[in-house]
Image (cartoon, coloured by chain):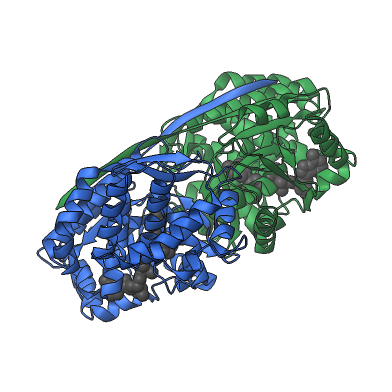
Chain colours: A green, B blue
């Protein structure tokens, strides 16, 4: 058949900034970015949408942003700072997405203007999706406020909302134009949300960087005590590993390999079954524990390293298993979850396991009996072992 | 401010095929494509959504597709061929978009499976958007059935629906995995729809390719008589010019320059004001006439070449102006349209004009008095001049 061949590459570039007190008047970084980022000679507008819990925890924030844009003029601030709930509700209830589109339209935010989102991964995912599809893409700035979003979700290229009761059913791969990680935001996080983000650091260290895993082992006490410098290092290293991974072979995940989803197949099911009462990071910690013990039982990972992984997870303060992760019969939710994950991937299962700390391996089958066994051990031996 | 730099490129590749009788059993090209295109070892599904007018005009089509996939097995056909209306309604009424998402979900179309859309630019735009956001992107095959979609909209990277009463308010830049242009489909087009697509060929020749413009002048009689070979050449050359343009500097239109929108600023307004009673190509033909005469009046384009452009447009059978394109006062719709176009671009106006046939130039201002003058001439002198 006769054909014309189309072929082109699109370059995507953005910076992930690290700062303290992003909107203090002495901090010109945000304005500097806006000034340098220009695709048109026209006046750029900037619309802020913020997690209402972040606004509540930082009562001065809205005023600070207004003062900032009174002093610095690289973009014209839309004076209304949009407040929306954080957490999974903002991805579950489509009306928030529609409302944000409405506001983007109302204020004539065009393709040379910005939607800046301040919040956890949930708000960033929703706002990023709205920005990606309005006018086929207005510019999106992410200002993550949780450990998870600063070290993982906020620095990546994905955005989404839930639909048909399915997690992330609608979304796009569209990078932000910039990410600003401000460590001040972490101060007001609950201990649970703070801890939850550490799971992604353990995950990425296990599949990418044994040294970083050791660093986590050595610094777990300071992390749990919420020492700022220690957390700053964790976030930066973890963000770096994520960025490098994305810039690697398959940024928009056209293939079926998803190494960064280590520990996630069971975690997604657990989050969903508990109606997100178990937080993402908490579920991931349990998912990592399960796949680590499975790696050991299937003869891939040494028992010594398995103990180190479980130990670190426990020291951070995570639970290592959950009744819903246990296999009691063929219809146990976790086995259903495995099936759904297979379908989600398009029929061929691809699961990351460990051969050693820092090195993953992909497998295409999992054995139900071994999953059951892993769950039992986690509930008994490992649950009882001292930390 | 400290930062990490992210930087990566994503390569996009697809073929635009040209064929006759795509789903005839002797034509293996479609199956060959599916067989070669593989991102997973799992079974690929393919869901067809077709313009109901195309299905009506080709009563054997649905059966032919089913027979094709009974013989060829590179993908598993979803036996229900989805029928949806063509024309702007499918982009205006969000329920078609929602319904298609629903069907994609219902049949578990995953990221390694296909949504194949058969129809004009309207259906392709809507289906392409749904495919682009479901699961953050399932594979999309375009099978354009109008002259316009085969030579222009169907071969590009944009998709969209209308929203808030605004044309293409929601959409993405996501290329199809393949385009199949089957000239058989053109046989059942109305003369108006057939002619309408010729406007884009005139447009692209004027800004990119003087030789192609001459070819159009020399072949206009055969085109109007719907000679198949002549139209095949037009479509192929026009598609090629569009593909080359997209592969050029700015495939996802991050800048504010839109050379392919020559003649479109007033056309968009006219379509909208007439509630799409004036077809896209018809409006574009008038828009080209206006901007060509404006180019002449503003001293950029010779009078001789201006006559040639207007003559060609008339010979195809297009009207060259419309009462709604006339400037009678400061609030004339066309001036409002210019203002809206400026806002749409983000404040800085960028309009393509001609310096000679085959060569465009971008300007950032248009003079209302000259627009008025151009409209008057088109209504009088040019309207009366012989073809
Ligand atoms: N896009 C991606 O690549 C990606 C990757 C991983 C996770 N995610 C998504 O991220 C979401 C989870 O994000 P998350 O863990 O950041 O949680 P979250 O956004 O749901 O926020 C958790 C809670 O903390 C509150 N909060 C946020 N920042 C705060 C602060 N500084 N002080 C006080 N309270 C604050 C929120 O209002 C919310 O109640 C999930 O939907 C997950 O699917 C996306
Ligand atoms: N994505 C892009 O880059 C891009 C570029 C240009 C235009 N467009 C969009 O394309 C749309 C116009 O597309 P179009 O001109 O192809 O018109 P259309 O899709 O609206 O179809 C016109 C009419 O012809 C019917 N039809 C289609 N194929 C037929 C066939 N083979 N036989 C009989 N009837 C048939 C349709 O049902 C419809 O009634 C507009 O919405 C425009 O915005 C998109
Ligand atoms: Zn995660
Ligand atoms: Zn057009």
Quarter where residue A46 is shown = top right
Residue A261, relative to residue B79: is it above or below?
A: above
In which quadrant will I find the N terminus of chain B?
top right
Q: Is residue A356 visible?
A: no
Task: Establish if B281 lies above or below B215.
Answer: below
Residue closest to the far left: B26
In the rendered view of the protein, which quadrant contains the C terminus of chain B?
bottom left
- Please tell me in which quarter of the rendered image ligand 3 is found: top right
Horizontal placement of A47 versus B84: left or right? right
Q: Where is residue B146 in the image (x, y as percent from the top left)?
A: 29, 66
Q: Position of residue B355 (x, y in %)?
A: 35, 40
Q: Is residue A80 above or below residue B375?
A: above
Vertical relation: A2 (above or below) A213: below
Image x and y of residue A132, in percent: 56, 48
Q: Residue at x 81, y 43 (%)?
A: A54
Q: Is residue B204 left or right of residue B258?
A: left
The picture quadrant where one finds residue A292 is top right
The foreground one among A2 and B232 is B232
């Amino acid at each position: 058949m006769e054909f014309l061949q189309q072929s082109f590459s699109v370059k995507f570039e953005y910076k992930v900034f690290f700062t303290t007190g992003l909107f203090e008047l002495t901090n010109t970084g945000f304005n500097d970015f806006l000034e340098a980022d220009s695709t048109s000679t026209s006046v750029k507008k900037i619309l802020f949408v913020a997690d209402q819990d972040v606004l509540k925890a930082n009562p001065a924030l809205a005023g600070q942003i207004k003062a900032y844009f009174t002093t610095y003029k690289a973009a014209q601030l839309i004076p209304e700072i949009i407040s929306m709930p954080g957490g999974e509700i903002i991805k579950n209830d489509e009306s928030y997405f529609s409302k944000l589109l409405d506001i983007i339209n109302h204020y004539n935010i065009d393709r040379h203007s910005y939607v800046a989102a301040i919040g956890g991964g949930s708000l960033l995912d929703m706002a990023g999706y709205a920005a990606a599809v309005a006018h086929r893409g207005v510019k999106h700035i992410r200002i993550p406020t949780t450990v998870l979003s600063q070290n993982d979700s906020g620095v990546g290229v994905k955005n989404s909302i839930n639909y048909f009761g399915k997690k992330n059913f609608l979304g796009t791969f569209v990078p932000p134009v910039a990410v600003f990680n401000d460590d001040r935001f972490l101060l007001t996080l609950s201990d649970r949300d703070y801890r939850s983000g550490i799971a992604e650091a353990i995950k990425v260290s296990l599949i990418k960087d044994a040294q970083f895993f050791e660093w986590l082992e050595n610094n777990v006490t300071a992390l749990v005590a919420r020492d700022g410098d220690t957390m700053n290092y964790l976030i930066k290293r973890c963000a770096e590993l994520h960025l490098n991974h994305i810039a690697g072979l398959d940024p928009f995940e056209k293939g079926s390999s998803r190494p960064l989803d280590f520990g996630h197949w069971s975690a997604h099911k657990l989050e969903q079954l508990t109606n997100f009462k178990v937080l993402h990071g908490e579920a991931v910690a349990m998912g990592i524990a399960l796949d680590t013990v499975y790696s050991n039982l299937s003869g891939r990972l040494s028992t010594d390293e398995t103990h180190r992984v479980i130990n670190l997870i426990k020291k951070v303060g995570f639970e290592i298993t959950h009744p819903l992760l246990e296999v009691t019969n063929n219809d146990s939710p976790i086995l259903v979850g495995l099936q759904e994950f297979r379908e989600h991937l398009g029929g061929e299962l691809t699961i990351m396991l460990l051969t050693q700390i820092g090195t993953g391996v992909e497998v295409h089958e999992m054995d139900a009996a071994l999953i059951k066994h892993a769950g039992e051990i986690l509930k008994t031996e490992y649950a009882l072992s001292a930390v």
